[in-house]
Structure formats: structure tokens, C-alpha cells
Amino acid sequence: MADLTVSTDIDTLLQSASNAAARTNLELGATDTVEFGGFVPPSGTAAEIDSVADATIGQVMINSDSGQLVRFTGAATYEVITSPSAYTKDSTTPSSTVTLSTSGFLEAGLVDQEANPFGPVTKVIIKAGGSDIDGQNSTSNTVYFYHDGSSPVLGNVAGWYSAGGLAPSGNVPVPADSLIVFTKTNSPLRSRVDIVSDVTENLLVTEPLEAGVQYSIQISVAVSDMLGGNVRFDSAYTGLFSESYATFSIDDLISGVRIGTFEGGLPVATEFLIAENGPYGANSPSIGYYLFNFKVTPSSSGSFTFSVGQNVSSTRPLYVNKTETTISALTT
């Protein structure tokens, strides 16, 4: 049939025109990229999009590498017009090998040695199985204290005991994924994974990054250090950065004080050592919250990793809470 003209009655156009004729007449483009009622832009890899030299201004394509939409501003130039992002919590399986005797709570000053077993002032409240940060959904709620060994009621034996029942409790496990509250400081500690006598890397985050895409990576994690000054984070990338920038901060959740900050360039691999004689001049707190922000543009595709560990092997553990990660591909 002959092409219809735009002067044709619209009802006639819709009822009698074939899709092909209408597309041609209205200059809607190829049949594999445009459909009535929907817009399906073509897609290509970053390299294929970069090689386009005859685009029409306003043309939109999907970058299949980064998942972003790009809009051409010239025959061979374009701008990114979307910012895909992802939010995840770590999938680390909760684990613990720590008991009250090896917990480090006493040595870190989170509880005091108590003389009166019937009215201890500083206690440890363990809420196991709680899914909420305040332990509301915990399956148990047990209270313990550390006795200084002065009471004949307990045989003048120093150690951990249960409040009320006064049962020896030094071998009681500190459950993984539990909420621990110290009455001395009223500071909660979430125990998910403990690290004891281990200077190897414990992977928290791994993410593939595409070359040429600018990323913003935010990582937050609570880590409790029973030794003090023994927390080490490591960030690494298997490729190269064309540009990079990083900031991080540490908040002591007991005192409420921000005890360390950093901002500057980010090499391919960076160690963040929190120790008094380290680059930030501050020890890691007994209960601390760490926030990292990375802005990076890889010049070669690779994998970004982020890990935590002890700086020196110690039986006084690190308690690592869930890691929350937000990764966004930024617009240019």
C-alpha cells in the first residue's frame, strides 16, 4: 500500500496503516528499536558506544556493561543520564569461638571486677538470636558479671558468674549474631563474627568494577576491639584507577567522640591501621563505628575488595557486625 501522509485522518491512520508504513511515514526509526506504546533503546558495550561516530543528538543507548542510559550530545559525544546503584548487607555466616573467659570484656574495661555477688553494679546482658538492633526479638536474655574472688559465698574464686543463679560461667559461649549490653557504659555491642588470633584478611566486600565508569562506594561497619589499637582494614583493586579519592571516619560509640578521620587519594591498595602509633594517631575503640567512602574511576576493569583483620595476632578478639555497602555508578 502507498505511504500515508500526516494529513490523513488519524482514525484512518491507526486503523489501516501497517506498522512499517506508519514508522516510515512518521520517521519513527527501525522496527527493532521502536514499538507503539513503548520505547526500547538500542544497547551496546562501553567500547561499542565509545566508537559511535554518527549519532543523532538526543539518541539514547543502554550501556550493557554498567547498566546506565547514555544520551548523545553530538555525533560522537554522549552524557550518562542515569545512576544505577546497589545496596547490600554482607552474607557472612555468623560465627563465634569466644567464651566469657576469652571475650576480653573485662580487660577492655567494659565491666569491672565486682565484690558483691548479690548486687553487682557492672554486668553483661547477652540477648541471643535478636534480629533487631535493640534485641527486641531475642530468644534469650541472660545476665553475667565478673567476681573479684573476695566472697566466700563463691569459694573466693574469681571469674564469670551468672547473676541470680551465681553459676560459674567462664565457659559460656558468646553467641554469634547476638546483642550484648554493658551496664557500665550502656553501650550495645552487636556480635556477628569474631576474629581471634588471626592476622589474615577477612573479606567483607567484593565488587566487580568496569573501566571508565565513575563509582561511589560507601561501606559502614561496626567493629569492637578488645585489645585496643588492633583493627586493620584493607581495600584493594585488581586493576588501575584513572582517578580516586577516599574518606573515612571512626566514631567511639561509648564516648560519642569522633576519634579519627582521613581523606585523600586512594592507591590500588590501601591499609587503614587504627593504632596509636599508626597514620591516624588514634587507637581503635572498644566499640566503634567505621564509615568509608570511596570515589573511583577504574582505567581497567577489575575487582574491588574490602577486608578487616587484626593487625597483630591477639587472643583478645575483634567483634565484627554486619557490613552495609552501597555502590553507585555516578553520572558524568
Image: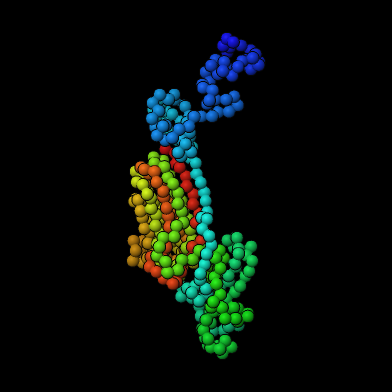
Q: In the image, is residue 322 above or below residue 39? A: below
Image position of 237 with respect to 136: above or below = above
Q: Where is residue 142 drawn, in percent x and y? A: 61, 72
Q: Residue at x 61, y 15 (%)?
A: 17
Q: Nearer the viewer, residue 116 or 33?
A: 33
Front-most of 120 and 54?
54
Estimate the x, y position of residue 135 in percent, counting from the top left.
60, 64
Tell whether 50 sits left or right of 27: left
Q: Looking at the image, which residue is at 46% across and 56% down?
A: 204
Quadrant where the image shows the C terminus: top left
Q: Residue at x 50, y 63 (%)?
A: 193
**Residue 18 seen anywhere in this rendered image of the structure:** yes
x 52%, y 73%: residue: 99
Task: Answer left or right for 136 relative to 27.
Answer: right
Q: Quadrant of the N terminus?
A: top right
Query: x and y percent of residue 308 in the render?
Result: 43, 60
